[in-house]
Amino acid sequence: MPVQMHNMSDNMAHHCAYNLPAVALTLGPENWTLLKGAYETLAADRQWKVRRIVASSIHELAVIVGEDVATQDLVPVFTGFIKDLDEVRIGALKHLAHFLKLLRPAGRNSFLPRLAEFLMTDYDWNWRFRKELAEQLLQALGLFTPADTCHHLTPVAMTLLLDKVANVRKVALHLVTKLVNHLSIDETLLRGLLAELAEQFAHNSRWNRRQTFALLCARLVAERVLSDELFAKDILPHLLDLSWDRVPNVRLAVARTLATELMAHSYYSDSASQGHESLMPVLKRLQNDRDRDVRYFATLPPRETTCVIQQVR
């Protein structure tokens, strides 16, 4: 009999957690105080499956109760989920950007120092968790000021771009590109970030990180994130240095970036421009590279290929 009562209690908690947003919608935000205690109890339930249900629907509840109540009462609950099991945290993480958009700026900013904690997982092989984090930050980036973004989110984005799993790095490339664009209104912050990217990637001893720098350059140029002059001054010298890299995969990424992206812009394709003068000797050298694949990518016309360079060949 005690076992049956225990199972009934467990099932009741599941049903309550699942249906609580609907009950809150029925009662209306003015009656939230009637549900607050029950909600906090469910969020701390000993069963992780119950807590995961609560975490997965917290953004829905935030819509119902409004930004004032969400900021005051739901932020502490969400913060508790950040320290929970991965099975619970992923429920909250999948709706992180949506939840942040529903908060007052003060409540939203209170999350900034905590976002790096999402990088820590119960198991290193749980790369999908880190990929989800990158995707959520990509959606949430515009919610914060450039200064706050630079201080709190840049380290997280850089860590994701250094991830050992290619699928995580692929999303992180989008994230860092958008991060550069977000900081572009503040030249001091922007140039500091560009210098850090060059140091961490272009001059890294690991070849796949040098290749990542070339791939990032391609995105920055393709999406017109930087002015031609700023790219030529702060980024291009590092990219051209990599054209001498001893690893063919790095030279291959450089060749593709130069041929299909930079040469698509008049600043580099116009024979009268300074950019053309610095670029063409390097591109011609890569067209005669000892590696067949490097030669192939160096001879492609601007933007003709839709091929995606893999991290390994």
Image (cartoon, grey):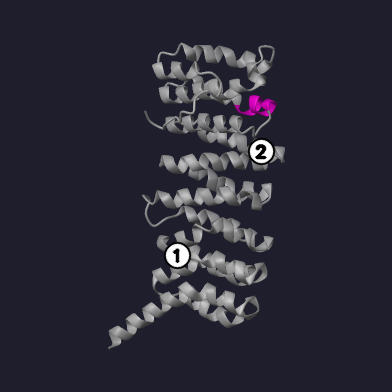
Image quarter (top left, top right, bottom left or bottom right) of the N terminus: bottom left
Number of numbered tags placed on the structure image = 2
Give the crowd class for mark 2: few <14, some 14-19, many >=20 residues within 10 Å.
many
In the rendered structure, the answer to whether residue 279 lies left or right of residue 124 reads: right
Residue at the spot 29% in from the left edge and 87% down from the top edge: 2
Give the crowd class for mark 1: few <14, some 14-19, many >=20 residues within 10 Å.
some
Q: Residue furthest front?
A: 26
Query: Where's residue 264, x and y in %?
Result: 60, 22
Residue at the spot 57% in from the left edge and 56% down from the top edge: 97
Q: Quadrant of residue 25?
A: bottom right
Depicted 235 relative to depicted 121: above or below: above
Q: Please indicate, yes or no, whether residue 136 appears anywhere in the rendered image.
A: yes
Q: Amino acid at mark 1?
A: Asp
Q: Amino acid at mark 2?
A: Leu
Disc on res. 84? 1
In the rendered structure, the answer to whether residue 246 lies left or right of residue 151 reads: left
Tag 1's secondary structure?
A: loop
Principal secondary structure, stretch drawn in magenta: helix
Disc on res. 236? none
Distance from Cα at disc 2 to Cα at disc 1: 35 Å
Depicted 237 relative to depicted 151: above or below: above
Tag 2's secondary structure?
A: helix
Query: Where's residue 154, x and y in %?
Result: 58, 45
Residue at the spot 38% in from the left edge and 52% down from the top edge: 126
Residue corresponding to mark 2? 190
Query: Where's residue 307, x and y in %?
Result: 46, 28
Frontmost residue, 306 versus 152: 306
Image quarter (top left, top right, bottom left or bottom right) of the C terminus: top left
Residue stretch in magenta = 228-235
Query: Where's residue 309, x and y in %?
Result: 44, 29
